[in-house]
Image: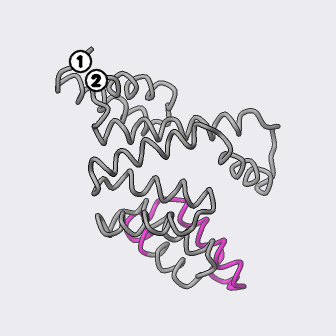
Amino acid sequence: MSINTNHLESGVGLGNLLLQKEEYKRAIKYFTFCLKSHPENSDVLYGTAVCKFRISLMNRLDSSKVGLSVQEEEELKEQIRIQPEVQASINFLKQSVQQTPNHLNSQRMLGEIYLRLKNYDKSQQHLRKALQINPEDPETLIWMGKYMHVTKDNKASLKYFKQAKELAPKDSRILRAMGRVYYEINDFENSE
């Protein structure tokens, strides 16, 4: 089975649209279809990986009890590393960066996954590569800030979060992350 370039672009476009809407189970159908005839396409590999990873995370959270505390939710997120879908996501993303080393989304997603898996060296490697590709990508700056926070470099963490906030001032994730860091360093005036 082979699809032409127009169908590939349409499939990836629809898949990406559904990714933005966080409709991962619908999006993966488009990416899987495109993957059959274009297994080397970085955008298809990235979309497939994101869908598998997000579905894996959602399934883990959906199967849990209702009314989780923040701590319990974080513990569940940690358990994703034992799921085969996570390894499949990593494999798709690795293929994507082999095909297109400057694929920003794949580099960033590898950094995110490795950070969640507590593989800090690989996380830093991919997040730094993503920043080299686009130093003004708010999503990468957020993940680099999270990486710095986890590795206990709060000053650098705040630097990345502030850069992200300048680029995406309405993103509430940035404010929450900054508040968490300020709280941990006992800067309660800025933690609000």
**In the displayed structure image, the side of residue 152 where residue 24 appears, left or right:** left
Location of the C terminus (image quadrant): bottom right
Q: Nearer the viewer, residue 137 or 88?
A: 88
Assign a secondary structure to mark 1: loop
Helix, strand or loop for disc 2? helix
* Crowd around label 1: few <14 · some 14–19 · many ≥20 (10 Å): few
Residue positioned 66% across, 83% down in the render: 189
Residue at label 1? 2
- Residue 102, located in which quarter of the rendered image? bottom left
Q: Which residue is mark 2?
A: 37
Whether 52 is drawn above or below 75: the answer is above
**In the rendered structure, which segment of residues is drawn in magenta?**
163-192
Q: Residue at x 71, y 34 (%)?
A: 62
Residue 18, horizontal then vertical, whole percent: 42, 32
> Which sits in the foreground, 156 or 185?
156
**Distance between mark 1 and mark 2 Cα atoms:** 5 Å
